[in-house]
Amino acid sequence: MELKLTKYGHACVRLESEGTVVVIDPGAFSEPEALAGADAVLVTHDHFDHVAPDALRAAAAAEPGLQVWTNASVAAQFADLGDRVHTVAHGDAFTVGGGAGIPVRVHGEKHAVIHSDIPVCDNVGFLVADRVFHPGDAFTVPEEPVSTLLVPVSGPWLKLGEVIDFVRAVGPREAYLIHEALLSEIGLQTAEQMVGRLAGGEGRSLSRLASGQTVVLA
């Protein structure tokens, strides 16, 4: 199955295969065109940089067939969308689109700790088409192989040492940096160089995509 991956702002990616469109984490820093024509939206958790309620409702109104998969706390916020919203948890699996569709498996339960004074919210990661893993705001290591890993590199909950260990633990063939909106260009270059030097190599590529840039995953 050929899969087309397009990076949009911050934590949002759009995946397309055989006419089916899956969008993950279209938040406040994402371009609105990410949602155009989407068949499914997957939301890892309820932070504003991962889900923009008004934009998601507008997309649902424009696309009557659009379905949403997310954890229970986010699903409750979109009760007005009725049975178009599906609650998932760690270990669940579902298929998006018609025909053979695109398979999705759910990994993870909790957001990474930001600070002891801040409650830890629910967070689920999505493995799409048995190859692309989006962890949300966590360093969940799936219990199955991942060929393409989306790697958060900035946020109040992480440090680069943990990012490096995460990439090493998952062991993908290729990795793309996401969750970078809080970094300057200098910070992005530093993160890319450090993670690439310490977690790349051995046949593994690591890079970052400009917003709107597309790669084809064979």
Image (cartoon, rainbow, N blue to C red):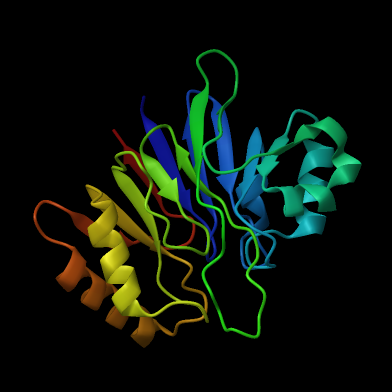
Q: Is residue 38 visible?
A: no
Q: Is residue 162 visible?
A: yes
Question: Could you tell whether 16 is left or right of 83 in the image?
Answer: left
Extreme residue toward the right, this view: 80
Question: Could you tell whether 167 is left or right of 79 in the image?
Answer: left
Q: Is residue 130 placed above or below 119 in the rendered structure?
A: above
Residue drawn at (26%, 57%) of the image: 169
Within the image, what quadrant is residue 130 found in? top left
Q: Is residue 23 placed above or below 140 in the rendered structure?
A: above
**Image quarter in which the C terminus is found:** top left
**Image quarter in which the N terminus is found:** top left
Extreme residue toward the front, this view: 116
Image coordinates of residue 52 in percent, x first then y, are 73, 60
Within the image, what quadrant is residue 188 found in? bottom left
Residue drawn at (67%, 66%) of the image: 47
Extreme residue toward the left, this view: 202
Image coordinates of residue 83 in percent, x first then y, are 82, 31
Image coordinates of residue 189 in percent, x first then y, are 30, 79
Question: Could you tell whether 62 is left or right of 112 in the image?
Answer: right
Front residue of 126 and 5: 126
Residue drawn at (51%, 69%) of the image: 112
Image coordinates of residue 80 in percent, x first then y, are 91, 43
Question: Could you tell whether 109 is left or right of 7 in the image?
Answer: right
Front residue of 125 and 176: 125
Within the image, what quadrant is residue 122 found in? bottom right
Total number of numbered discs in the rendering: 0
